[in-house]
Image: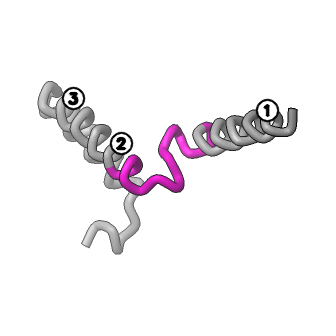
Amino acid sequence: MAARDSSRNTLEMESFHRRFSAWTPFTNKSLNRQLFQERVALISHWFDLWTNKQRQEFLFTIFLRCTKSQLR
């Protein structure tokens, strides 16, 4: 019974971490990097399909989120 409770607690903690990390793994750096690369590829694919106006709007939105030091 204790093993079952421990297993359930582990699953609950993993669920908690995924929920608040937007499904990005905290502790697995390799998986985190892979997921980041997949997201970049997906956004790049969308970017290729957008019009110039859509690209400008997207870039404007992203640049507004950056700090001055990030824009250097």
Instruction: Please report contact status of discs 3 and 1: CB closer than 8 Å, yes or no.
Output: no
Q: Position of residue 23 (x, y in %)?
A: 51, 38
Q: Residue at x 26, y 36 (%)?
A: 43
| Residue nearest the observer in this picture, 35 or 55 | 35
Q: Quadrant of residue 69?
A: bottom left
Q: Position of residue 6 (x, y in %)?
A: 78, 41
Question: Residue at 65% across / 36% down in the picture?
Answer: 15
In the rendered image, the vertical position of residue 1 relative to residue 67, given as above or below: above
User: For residue 70, which numbered disc appears in the image?
Assistant: none
Residue placed under numbered mark 3 in the picture: 46
Where does the magenta region start and end? 19-33
Residue at label 1? 4
- Label 3 vs label 1: CA separation? 44 Å
What is the number of the mark on residue 35? 2
Task: State left or right for residue 42 relative to residue 17.
Answer: left
The outermost residue toward the right is 1
Q: Are marks 1 and 2 in contact (CB under 8 Å)?
A: no
**Whole-percent x and y of residue 52?**
13, 33
Q: Residue at x 32, y 46 (%)?
A: 34
Q: Earlier in the sequence, mark 3 or mark 2?
A: 2
The quadrant in which the N terminus is found is: top right
Q: The disc labelled 2 sits on which kind of residue?
A: Leu
Task: Find numbered disc 3 in the image and state the secondary structure of the residue it sits on.
Answer: helix
